[in-house]
Amino acid sequence: MFLKSKEIHLKCTHCSQITAYQKASIVCPLCGGTILQAEYDLEELVHCHWKDKLSTRYPSLWRYHELLPLFDSNHIVTLGEGWTPLIQAQRFGKLIGLDYLYIKDERQNPTGSFKDRQASVTISVMKEQGIKEMVLASTGNVAISYSAYAARAGIKLWAFLSGLTPDEKIREIQLYGAEVVKVPGTYDQTKQVAAEFAQNQGIFLDSGLKSFTSGESMKTMALELGEQLHGQAPDWFIQGVSGAMGPIGVVKGFEEMMALGMVDKVPRLGMIQSSGCNPMVQAFEKGEREAIPVTDPKTAIATLATGNPGFAYSWLYDLMQKYGGAMEQATDAEAYTVTRLLAQTEGISVEPATAVAFAGLIKLAQRGIIQPQERVVINCSGHTYPVEEQILTEEFAPEASTQFKW
């Protein structure tokens, strides 16, 4: 059992109204806003020397339960996610001119991606709230994670998948017993269909970043990094982005660690998009806080094919103005080339979204935006499999081979 005195509040990101957390689906009682962030009694954690207790705890994201939105540990749904390795990429780093490049190896999560963090926290909260059935939209990894954790929790899952989702991923989702609905359209269209179905059927809809549990889960990457780097935050956190949930959560994690005296700064963000679906990059380069949606994504990398980032980009833009950072883009061909290069220098096989992040990182290093001596952590968000057949074709290599100069 967690402490009975644990208090959780939700702060509206629109009007700053603070409300005691009582249920999973909630809107701001003052303005009706739906984007809420969880807040905890950080002063009490400082007073009780919370950070000193972490070293004795089991290596799981739930070691940080005081900073997660669950009241009773009996409702935790876990498969051993979190506390993934932090690996220094010395050979690849030397190749691109970075002395301190680290890979946060999220492939080691139970279903092979960092989305297991989101699934564990969200499904646990749903279990605590007595929710028995849910709907979500996905390009693959989220649905795989949620279907596994929902099966473990006894929750029925409806997974709406975009037309780009590989058949291999669909079969895995079905294996866990989820009801799969494939939508012949973009991810944005898939989200709309899923939302309409959930509303018509009266079923709980997972709303991604709009659900505060998602950001809370992703901040555990930052909490782990604070421990793994012995209290020194990295200078840069790099990730391939589509909806920006990961980095927004990571920033919140570092902010809370600063308040707890665990680190002294929040890292700059290096956000990388596919050049075939890059609304954030386009807006950021113009200094604009709102992104114009890409209605027809031109990328085979499904996990990065969100054409309309909506409010998430504005949120991310504000964070990057506050803490610093840069945005970059990379083609599918560049990503597939880097997949091979990383595997052959570090023995690490990554998913396409991670390969895009590495390709963008190379460009940021070559442009001098990231300096050789800076400490860089990149989110290795998932494994090459089950999309290796697409990645390992030869057709993309010639186009990309001239893009990078070592």
Image (cartoon, grey):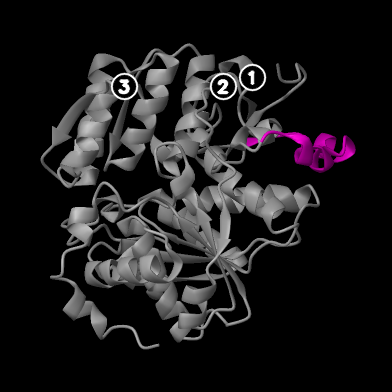
Quadrant of residue 29 within the rendered picture: top right
Residue type at numbered disc 3: Leu
Tag 2 residue? 76
Residue linked to disc 3 = 157
Q: Furthest residue to the bottom?
A: 405
Q: Residue, x 54% and y 47% (percent of image)?
A: 249
At label 2, the amino acid type is Ile
Q: In the rendered view, does 225 fall on the left or right side of 102?
A: right
Quarter of the rendering containing residue 37: top right
**Local SS, label 2:** loop
Question: In the image, what residue occupies the spot 69% across and 59% down?
Answer: 229
In the displayed structure, does residue 351 sit left or right of residue 90?
A: left
Main SS of the magenta segment? helix
Residue 206 visible to the viewer? no
Q: Are the two marked residues, 1 and 3, in contact with CB atoms closer than 8 angstroms?
A: no
Look at label 1 and name its amino acid.
Answer: Ser
Indicate yes or no whether the magenta region holds residue 395. no
Q: Which mark is residue 73?
A: 1
Q: Which segment did they paint magenta?
A: 38-58
Task: State the quadrant of the N terminus.
Answer: top right
Q: Examine the structure image and report whether residue 44 is included in the region drawn in magenta.
A: yes
**SS under mark 3:** strand
